Image: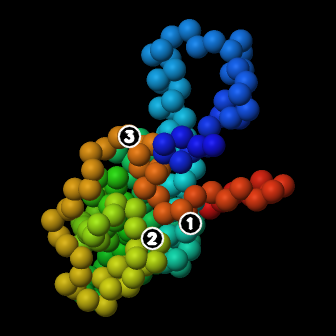
């Protein structure tokens, strides 16, 4: 059984048992905090798997990727590609839960980036193949994507964001396997 976000219910609840540690929730506020933390952990696991699939699809090194599950959630992938029209700059692929995917130039300082194009489209979390096609298109054509940042959603509510991840990005539960899904 799963919650509205698609995250599995705790084992004790799915089995009709009491929660560990006595079985009573003493404070409704504490219960809400626990639910939010559970949603954040569920989102973190699913987003990590999704990001791993994006990184594989674009042919990047997994070591060049970082993400932050905060508000707003964000990801960064350093790329070993350059554009002919900007020969002195490395490329980066960025994602934010508000604006989605973007291709950016890294400055020499490593602290600043300049966005060249946002993917836009109907989804803040498109399929990894869509992200790879966008990156390839930016590499070959200067007029791809959109420059004004799209606004997909307000930051936060990571449980809702977890439910938007493509099913293929959800961690696999292979019997007897404890592999990292990303």
- Mark 1 and mark 3 in contact? Answer it, CB < 8 Å: no
Q: Nearer the viewer, residue 92 or 135?
A: 135
Label 2 CA crowd tier, 10 Å (few <14, some 14–19, many 20+):
some
Estimate the x, y position of residue 110 in percent, counting from the top left.
36, 61
For the question of whether residue 110 can be seen, the reply is no
Residue 167's x, y, as percent? 54, 62
Q: Are marks 2 and 3 in contact (CB under 8 Å)?
A: no
Label 2 to label 3, Cα distance in Å? 21 Å
Residue at 51% over, 30% down = 35
| Horizontal relation, residue 42 to residue 115: left or right | right
For disc 1, the neighbor class at 10 Å (few under 14, some 14 to 19, many from 20) is: few
Q: Secondary structure at mark 3?
A: loop
Q: Earlier in the sequence, mark 2 or mark 3?
A: 2
Q: Are marks 2 and 1 in contact (CB under 8 Å)?
A: yes
User: What residue is rendered at 50% in x and 70% in y?
Assistant: 54
Mark seen at residue 157: 3
Between the residue at mark 1 and the residue at mark 3, the CA separation in whole angstroms equals: 21 Å
**Residue holding disc 1:** 168
Q: Position of residue 112 (x, y in %)?
A: 28, 59
Check the image and report above or below for 102 versus 49.
Answer: below
- Choose the circle earlier in sequence order: 1 or 3: 3
**From what the image shows, is residue 27 above or below residue 80?**
above
At x 56% / y 74%, what residue is drawn?
56
| SS for callout 1 | helix
């Amino acid at each position: 059984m799963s919650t509205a976000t698609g995250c599995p219910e705790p084992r004790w609840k799915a089995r009709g048992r009491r929660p560990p540690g006595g079985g009573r929730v003493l404070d409704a506020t504490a219960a809400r905090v626990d639910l939010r933390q559970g949603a954040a952990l569920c989102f973190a696991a699913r987003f990590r798997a999704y990001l791993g699939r994006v990184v594989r699809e674009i042919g990047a090194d997994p070591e060049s990727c970082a993400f932050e599950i905060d508000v707003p959630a964000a990801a960064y992938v350093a790329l070993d590609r350059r554009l002919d029209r900007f020969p002195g700059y490395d490329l980066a692929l960025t994602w934010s839960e508000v604006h989605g995917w973007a291709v950016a130039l890294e400055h020499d300082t490593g602290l600043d980036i300049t966005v060249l194009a946002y993917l836009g489209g109907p989804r803040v979390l498109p399929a990894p193949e869509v992200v790879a096609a966008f990156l390839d298109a930016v590499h070959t054509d200067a007029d791809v994507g959109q420059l004004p940042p799209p606004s997909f959603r307000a930051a936060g509510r990571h449980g809702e964001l977890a439910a938007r991840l493509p099913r293929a990005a959800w961690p696999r539960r292979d019997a007897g396997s404890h592999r990292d899904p990303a």
